[in-house]
Amino acid sequence: MTALSGRTARPLPAPSPRTARLVRRLRITRGLLITVTMTLFSLFTLFPFAWMALTSLRTGSDLYRVADQPFAVSGLTLEHFRALLTETKFLTWSLNSLIVALCASAIALLIGVPAAYSLGRLRYRGGAIVGVIVFSTYLLPPALLFIPMNVVINRLHLANTLGALILVYLTFLVPFIAWMLSSYFQSLPVELAEAARIDGASRLRAMVVIDLPLVLPGVVSVFFFAFTLCWQEYLYALTFVRSADKQPVAVGLVNALQVGDVFAWGQLMGGALLGALPVVIVFSFLMDYYLSGLTAGAVKG
Amino acid sequence: MTMATDTLDPAAGIGPPPGRHAPGAAAGRWSLLEREAPLGYLLVLPMAVVVLGLVGYPLVLTVWFSLTDKSLGSDAVSFVGLANYLGLIDDPVFGRTMWNTFNYTVTAVVAKLVLGLVMALALNEVRRFRRFFRAAFLLPWVVPSSLSVLAWMWMFQADFSVLTYLGRQVGLVDGNIPWLGEAGWAMAAVQTVNIWRGAPFFGIIILAGLATVPKDLVEAAVVDGASAWQRLRYIILPHLAPILVVVTLFSFVQTLGDFQIVWILTNGGPVNSTHLISTLAFRTGIRGADIATGSAISFFVFPALAAIIALQLAVMRRKAK
């Protein structure tokens, strides 16, 4: 810390024993402060998940002793998970989420990747405006559009289908993909594609054969992020899909496990954990990539 | 979609390979696409269709519906001018909702900014287990909030709340807390969940920003005897300012459009005390089938949203220069 400031030619005088003690004490308080802060933040962020896990694994009678002895566990059980998987439509909901997320992300890639190439690599009149529109569209929340969208979906006779969700999710997936990948395309060296064109390849051919393979890692990651965006979506799914057989996890779980005012808490917590799993797995593999993409966006703008 | 594949396929190598010595051999039908502009427009076209048809058109519909008496299932629609908007302004529930939305958004964004900053500054000093902490902090952000909010719902149950129990153990709480049963508590509860979910996002972005603060500058300040607070105030914060602005504006947009936390936890209650524009619009326009009023309600987020997005674009353009 006190090292080379480049100002003093002479080495710094050795600290007296008293300063050394002071520095050590300061360092200890600082370390303590950081440890305490880290512990508090970890408790804050992780406690709800720990509580979820504990709830999903304990017996029903333990659950309602929470008022006086919340951490008393007389036995662990997988009963809630068994009930969740066999007595509810949890697997159907998960399958619905999977179908919607995979289809919507794949279609969004087919539309978004060419657009990203166009925005990142080609110069033409209005290109900047298209960029602005893409960014603004990506930021528009579903809360603004869900009511008229419901009318559109009814007119298309897509109400209560997974197709409605696949179609509507394109509204945020395509701008997201175009935005993320356009800067990726921009960062590629143009020389390779130019060399290919000198050798006679058409522009399109150069794009597909030369540039696309180079952005493939980005495309794969963006696909998975699109997947997680679909998996997390709630408002559109709640609006368009009314029957329990067609609902994705996020909506089905809450709606079905509430009987009157009584919730099956054990199953609900187990379902929330399992339902979050795919997204957590994706992020555990791609966290660094996600962060670098996010921060590049924030730092560069 | 078909459009994109149709235009891509010929280039994917199915067509005859272009002659090596004749750069114009790929000409003919595709020669137009050798120029940047036509190709650029063509590749953007599918996205333009999606954006115009599925975002632009509904946006226009919102405005149109809000000026009519449209309701679900009826096609007989008549123009009523600003009647829906005037009716809302007189409606105390809507007034309350506007205030709630403002309160929810501003409180949560400010709290997320402050907590995120503290989180980043602390995490920046940590050497060991850094990846673990980063992952742990990011978990609330990653898990779908419609699912994680269920854990909070369980923790907020009036009679079985582990939070009340913990509060009692520490001696802060006496008796039961009506987490979701009383207006003040309920608003604090939904804000807490929003902050819990969003603060890590701030923290992680700011952490990345801290890595770009020049080390020699900070070290020089240390040598000159600047206190930790002075270093933060005069070196680190000015350096972080652009990132803080971008992430704060982004969070404003996200928080303004928030729906599921309130809808799942309180349904807007008790007695409409936690309704946000989004939840009131859902109750009116979807559950209540009153599309006209619902559209008018949801359109009230638009001015604020447009202003924030414009600001964000302006900031980004200035930084790009």
Image: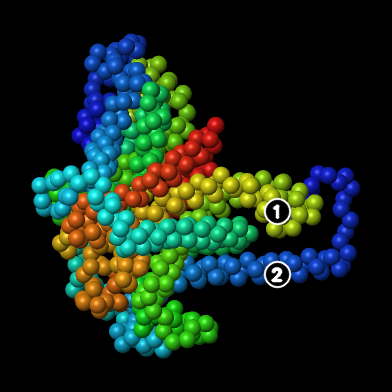
**Nearest-to-viewer mark from 2 and 1:** 1
Q: What percent of the width, then of the height, locates residue B209?
A: 57, 48
B61 versus B96 height, above or below: above
Q: Which mark is residue B231?
A: 1
- Amino acid bearing label 2: Thr
In this view, the residue in front, A217 or B64, is B64
Name the subunit of mark 2.
A
Which image quarter: residue B101?
Answer: bottom left
How far is mark 2 from mark 1, CA to CA? 18 Å
Work out which quarter of the rendered image holds the N terminus of chain A and state it. Answer: bottom right
Discs 2 and 1 lie in a common subunit = no
Q: Which one is nearer the viewer's eye here, B112 or A294?
A: B112
CB under 8 Å between discs 2 and 1: no
Residue ID at (42%, 57%): B102
Q: Is residue A196 above or below residue B101?
A: above
Number of callouts in the render?
A: 2
Q: Amino acid at mark 1?
A: Arg
Q: Mark 1 packing: few (<14 Cα in 10 Å), some, or many (20+)?
A: some
**Residue at image location 38% in from the left, 46% down from the top:** B303
Write down the residue under mark 2: A29
Instruction: Please say if B160 is above or below B225.
Output: below
